[in-house]
Amino acid sequence: MAEFTDLTEDIKSLALRELGARLVGVAPAERLSGAPVGHRPIDFIPDARAVVVMGLPIVTPLMRWNSFMEGSVHIPETLAYTDDQGNPRTWKPLQTIRKHVERRCSYETINDELQRMSLYMALFLEEWGYQALYLPTTYGATHSWDDSGPKPPNGMSPFSHRHAAVAAGLGELGMNNLLLTSQYGPRVRLVSVITSAPLIADEPLQEPICLGEKCALCVRNCPAQAFGALHALPLPGQTSLLASFDVGACRNHYNRSGGHCGRECMTSCPLVSRGPCKEFSGRIKDEQPRAR
């Protein structure tokens, strides 16, 4: 057991000290055995024992991206032009650049970092004799995704990093179906590494984070009205109150509005303004590399 404790401490130290993660947790594979067939840890590695979940936050000011450059003297709200067929058209350069900032800084850059971190975590575990598989971050402007074709049904991804994060004790699912953490609220991106290593698991959170029906701003402020009836979802160590989510309504609004969505399901959450964990810098400083 001591050997596995040491290995668990090593992978957490690697994630925080060397790879740059701000969140890291370990879930036992069996906690995710209730996932849909084909999407469980054992469907990727038959003898999977654990899932390592790492996270990076979106910096707080990016939650205000939809108001950036207000009143710019250089970038107009709308601009007239003539297309190749000689037809008069208009476009919205300010909104286009705002979306570029948001997608690049809140998704693409963070996704690239998470993929790098998960690669090196998987290599570390393999070098110690265990199978390890890292998986893509979930959509969010990933470079290899073909946006010209149809989307997966129900927004399904290969593996649910947010459910793995709940199982690893990093947070809970909020009414908006997003992971909520005590350190960063909903502004977190995640990646997972499935492994055959028998790591020591973290306990699921016991104290609720989401304010639930007392707040519900994420649900009420959705411009697509994509959220519906509330339902209880049993998860490892807790039961979350979630609003049903209509992926089609969300996509239809996004397409009809020319991609205009302020991510109100995230930005309206009062937990968005929470700062980083006060103990984080101390935890990094105090941890010492373990000789092996």
Image (spheres, rainbow, N blue to C red):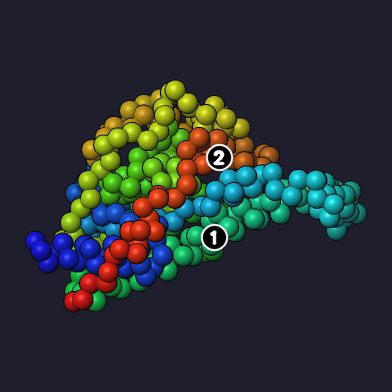
Q: Is residue 243 positioned above or below 200 on the image?
A: above
Name the image quarter holding residue 286: bottom left
Residue shown at the point (68%, 51%) measured from the top left: 98
Whether residue 193 sits left or right of residue 102 in the image: it is left
Q: Position of residue 54 (x, y in %)?
A: 36, 57
Q: Position of residue 205 (x, y in %)?
A: 28, 41
Q: CA distance from mark 1 to mark 2?
A: 18 Å
Comes first in the chain, label 1 or label 2: 1
Q: Is residue 216 positioned above or below 255 on the image?
A: above
Residue shown at the point (35%, 43%) measured from the top left: 171
In this orientation, does residue 72 appear? yes
Which residue carries the number 1 mark?
A: 108
Kind of residue at badge 1: Glu
In the rendering, which numbered label is found on residue 267? 2
> Mark 2 falls on what kind of element?
helix
Whether residue 39 sits left or right of residue 151 in the image: it is left
In the rendering, which numbered label is found on residue 274? none
Classify 10 Å Cα crowding around label 2: few (below 14), some (14-19), many (20 and above). Answer: many
Task: State the quadrant of the C terminus.
Answer: bottom left
> Mark 1 falls on what kind of element?
helix
Between 209 and 53, the residue placed more toward the observer is 209
Task: State the quadrant of the N terminus.
Answer: bottom left
Classify 10 Å Cα crowding around label 1: few (below 14), some (14-19), many (20 and above). Answer: some
Kind of residue at badge 2: Thr
